[in-house]
Image (tube, grey):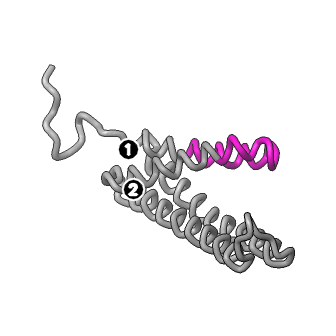
């Protein structure tokens, strides 16, 4: 099976998506600052800081997911428990964002997010626990 290339492509896509999400949040922070927006009387500076924080945090999370997929591809072993949980969380977020993006941004954004979702699921399924994996006892017949 072509699990190593799937994991490496997933890592590359997530690595390229990280600066994109930071850039989108930077644009949103610029709009919030320029229009002095607030939510229920909150300080506009806090809104700008929160938007930047969300963008940077999301970018770092995508980079961490990319690192997990890259290590899985390079080692050709499934990620550990924390890595799998991280990739599952990333897949859930991409699925939810894809559902929202269809109405707000259009079908192109939906297609991109669902493609990344598919890559994440393929990576997780390709490295599913094998019965004949080294170091594990074979299952009795």
Query: Is label 2 in contact with label 1 (beta carbons under 8 Å)?
Result: yes
24 or 65: nearer the viewer: 24
Instruction: Decide whether the magenta segment is chiefly helix, strand or loop.
Output: helix
| Separation of marks 2 and 1 at Cα, in angstroms | 8 Å
Q: Which residue is drawn at 70% across and 48% down?
A: 112
Q: Where is residue 58 in the image (x, y as percent from the top left)?
A: 58, 65
Residue 111 colored in magenta in the image: yes
Residue beneath disc 2: 72
Q: In this view, does 29 lie to the left or right of 71?
A: right
Q: Which residue is drawn at 72% across and 43% down?
A: 111
Q: What element carries label 2?
A: helix
Q: Position of residue 35 (x, y in %)?
A: 86, 74
Find the magenta span and give its range.
Answer: 97-119
Q: Which residue is drawn at 24% across and 41% down?
A: 133
Image: 126 above or below 33: above
Residue 135 colored in magenta in the image: no
1 or 9: nearer the viewer: 9
Q: Position of residue 64 (x, y in %)?
A: 47, 65
Residue beneath disc 1: 127
């Amino acid at each position: 099976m072509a699990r190593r290339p799937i994991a490496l492509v997933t890592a590359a896509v997530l690595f390229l998506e990280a600066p994109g999400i930071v850039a989108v949040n930077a644009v949103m922070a610029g709009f919030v600052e320029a229009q002095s927006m607030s939510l229920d009387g909150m300080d506009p500076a806090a809104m700008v800081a929160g938007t930047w924080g969300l963008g940077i945090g999301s970018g770092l999370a995508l980079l961490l997911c990319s690192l997990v997929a890259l290590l899985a591809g390079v080692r050709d072993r499934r990620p550990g428990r924390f890595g799998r949980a991280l990739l599952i969380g990333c897949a859930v977020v991409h699925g939810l964002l894809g559902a929202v993006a269809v109405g707000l941004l259009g079908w192109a954004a939906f297609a991109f997010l669902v493609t990344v979702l598919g890559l994440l699921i393929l990576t997780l399924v390709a490295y599913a626990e094998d019965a004949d994996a080294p170091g594990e006892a074979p299952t009795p017949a």
